Image: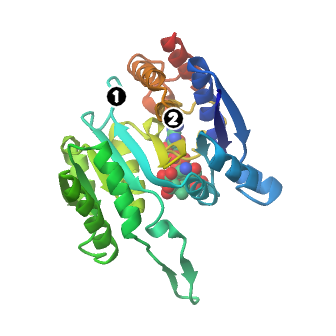
């Protein structure tokens, strides 16, 4: 049976990097791509950023490849992560031989809680002077993340939090995650998330897998992108029990959108994660290796100091696969 992959390009460079990744997927397998829309442009046309058909298609698909949405990103990607019931966002941040990086020794995977924290949506304007946000942390979501982390990193992992200040919410998160790890005999090391930001810049080698609350995972993975050569390199996987959505960590990059020079690596690496998720391990590895060797030997897009187009890089990656 041909696997169905839902494709949502979104806005800006999503329209450039997603077709690039689809052509790589076409080069390694026989998939049925079902295209759906979401984002700023759709909102302008129809009044809603995330059409019901898109949400339903993503919820029902074997897997989804998503690009990026612009100003409507929170109205699109957050519900889509919910559509796949994703409890963890896996964000590998690693440097590649041949790519200029502030910290070439970086090789870290962030396991970001994907459903709650300050992303729970409970924001209120109480007066002209006062707005509030409720931060939600449940033991069940934290434990679910911890179970995944223990399977993913049985050799142990760091837990980033700020339970010294957010004693109730991050305290609950920390206790739930370390509690599951203790039960399973998996070692954990706690690190305060602000201190982590310094440690990771000075000595990234001491970190392999870092489990963190939702917003911390967002910010710290972008910080790690800065250490390895930029946002054009970071893929991600939103994993649920029966479904998953894959997307680059970056956004729509309005400063370069439409120029055909976006780095497709993050999205193609997300496609490699998608392949592995669907059980195409060999193909996933082949795609990852093709990206690595193209990053090493070129051509490279301008964000990495080259002058190649998105299309040049994609063709080079496909050539590597042959
Ligand atoms: N998941 C999402 O849909 C998502 C994520 C982040 C931001 N956004 C949205 O994207 C828009 C722009 O946000 P931003 O500028 O803060 O972040 P951004 O990730 O779009 O861009 C930040 C910088 O990184 C560069 N960059 C990002 N991806 C690149 C790539 N593949 N190749 C080369 N350079 C790349 C951009 O040119 C820019 O200089 C906003 O509207 C924001 O809401 C969406
Ligand atoms: C746009 C926003 C909702 C999103 C997030 O915070 O998760 C983005 O920053 C990301 O990292 O994918």
* Image quadrant assignment for residue 28: top right
| Mark 2 within 8 Å of ligand 1, using the beta carbon | no
Residue 61 lies, in percent from the top left, at 63, 42
Q: Quadrant of the N terminus?
A: top right
Q: Are marks 1 and 2 in contact (CB under 8 Å)?
A: no
Q: Looking at this view, name the residue that lies furthest to the right.
A: 45
Is residue 21 visible in the rendered image? The answer is yes
Q: Residue at x 56, y 81 (%)?
A: 124
Crowding around mark 2 (Cα neighbors within 10 Å: few <14, some 14 to 19, many 20+) is many
Q: Which mark is residue 274?
A: 2
* Image quadrant assignment for residue 75: bottom right
Q: Which residue is mark 1?
A: 96
Mark 1 or 2, nearer chain start: 1
Q: CA distance from mark 1 to mark 2?
A: 20 Å
Secondary structure of residue under mark 1? loop
Residue 62 lies, in percent from the top left, at 60, 39
Crowding around mark 1 (Cα neighbors within 10 Å: few <14, some 14 to 19, many 20+) is many
Vertical relation: 85 (above or below) 4? below
| 226 with respect to 178 (left or right) | right
The residue lying toward the viewer, choosing from 141 and 97, is 141
Secondary structure of residue under mark 2? helix
């Amino acid at each position: 049976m041909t696997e169905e992959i839902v494709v949502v390009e979104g806005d800006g460079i999503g329209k450039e990097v997603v077709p690039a990744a689809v052509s790589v997927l076409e080069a390694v397998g026989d998939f049925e791509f079902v295209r759906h829309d979401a984002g700023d442009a759709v909102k302008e046309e129809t009044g809603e950023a995330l059409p019901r058909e898109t949400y339903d298609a993503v919820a029902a698909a074997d897997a989804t490849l998503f690009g990026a949405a612009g100003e409507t990103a929170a109205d699109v990607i957050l519900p889509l992560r919910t559509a796949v019931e994703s409890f963890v966002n896996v964000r590998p941040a690693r440097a590649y031989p041949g790519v200029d990086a502030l910290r070439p020794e970086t090789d870290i995977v962030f396991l970001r809680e994907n459903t709650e924290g300050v992303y729970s949506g409970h924001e209120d304007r109480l007066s002209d002077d006062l707005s509030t946000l409720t931060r939600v942390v449940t033991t069940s979501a934290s434990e679910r993340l911890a179970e995944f982390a223990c399977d993913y990193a049985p050799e142990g992992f760091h837990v980033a939090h700020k339970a010294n200040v957010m004693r109730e919410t991050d305290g609950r998160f920390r206790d739930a995650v370390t509690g599951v790890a203790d039960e399973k005999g998996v070692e954990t090391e706690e690190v305060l998330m602000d201190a982590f930001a310094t440690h990771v810049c000075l000595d990234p080698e001491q970190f392999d897998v870092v489990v963190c609350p939702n917003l911390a995972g967002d910010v710290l993975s972008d910080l790690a992108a800065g250490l390895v050569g930029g946002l054009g390199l970071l893929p991600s996987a939103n994993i649920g029990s029966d479904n998953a959505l894959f997307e680059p960590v970056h956004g729509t990059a309005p400063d370069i959108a439409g120029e055909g020079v976006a780095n497709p690596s993050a999205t193609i690496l997300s496609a490699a994660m998608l392949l592995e998720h669907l059980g195409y391990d060999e193909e996933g590895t082949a795609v990852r290796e093709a990206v690595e060797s193209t990053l090493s030997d070129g051509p490279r897009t301008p964000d990495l100091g080259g002058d190649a187009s998105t299309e040049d890089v994609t063709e080079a990656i496909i050539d590597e696969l042959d």
